[in-house]
Image (spheres, helix red, strand yellow):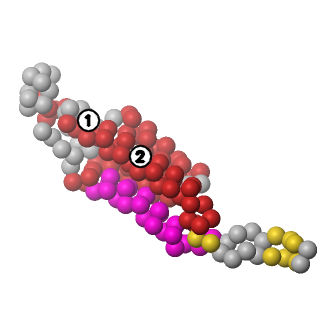
Amino acid sequence: MRRLNGFTVLFLVLAALWGVLQFVLAFFVHVRSRGHETSAGWVVPPTKTYMQADGVSEVVLTLVILALVGAVGANLHRRVTRGLQGAGGLAWAVSVVTLALGVVGFVYAFGVGICLLLACASVSRHGAASAAEHPAVTGGRTG
């Protein structure tokens, strides 16, 4: 049975760690709330961590990032075990969408997107040729 190569696994693990790291940092990084005018004057609320200010959003963002990494990883694994060539359109599309989310404002997704693109690029482009050499992988078909 064929497996993902070491570089592909490394990039997938880095993408997942990037997503988990953003979740952990949400407990420590503080954000400042906007001040507002009151009858007593200008009031600036105390700072809060991202988790205190937007806990649900942080959990959702982390789950989405891990789901995207899982989707790419599962797709790459399926393609490699079937002896298909390259990463495939689905893995590339999910990786590009993740990178685009990072560009348009979800900053943590940018690093994940880069790692996913690198994982897709690191998949062997000779999968189909090596599957033809091992008929057991293709169910007896050669070619």
Judging from the image, what secondary structure is the residue with disc 1 in? helix
Is residue 110 something one can see in this rendering? no
Q: CA distance from mark 2 to mark 1?
A: 18 Å
Residue 27 visible somewhere in the drawing: yes
Q: Nearer the viewer, residue 85 or 82?
A: 82
Magenta residues, start to end: 10-31
Residue at horizontal 15%, vertical 40%?
2
Q: Nearer the viewer, residue 20 or 116?
A: 20
Mark with earlier residue (2, 1): 2
Residue 89 belongs to magenta span: no
Residue 67 x %, y %: 41, 46
Query: Is 3 placed left or right of 27 in the picture?
Result: left
Name the residue carrying label 2.
67
For the residue carrying disc 1, how many other residues have a C-alpha within 10 Å: few (<14), some (14-19), or many (20+)? many
Q: Nearer the viewer, residue 2 or 62?
A: 62
> Looking at the rendering, in which quadrant would you find the N terminus?
top left
Q: Main secondary structure of the magenta part?
A: helix
Kind of residue indicated by mark 1: Arg
Residue type at mark 2: give it. Answer: Ala
> Is 23 included in the stretch rendered in magenta?
yes
Q: Residue furthest right?
A: 39
Q: Position of residue 44 (x, y in %)?
A: 76, 76
Q: In the image, is residue 99 above or below residue 77?
A: below
Q: What x and y, as percent, mark residue 53?
A: 62, 65
Location of residue 29 (image quadrant): bottom right
Q: In the picture provided, is 120 more to the left or to the right than 96?
A: left
The quarter of the picture where the C terminus appears is top left
Task: Identify the element where label 2 is drawn.
Answer: helix
The residue drawn where x is 53% and y is 58% is 58
Q: Report the disc number at residue 79.
A: 1
**Up/down of 9 relative to 141, above or below:** below
Choose mark 2 or mark 1, whichever is in front: 2
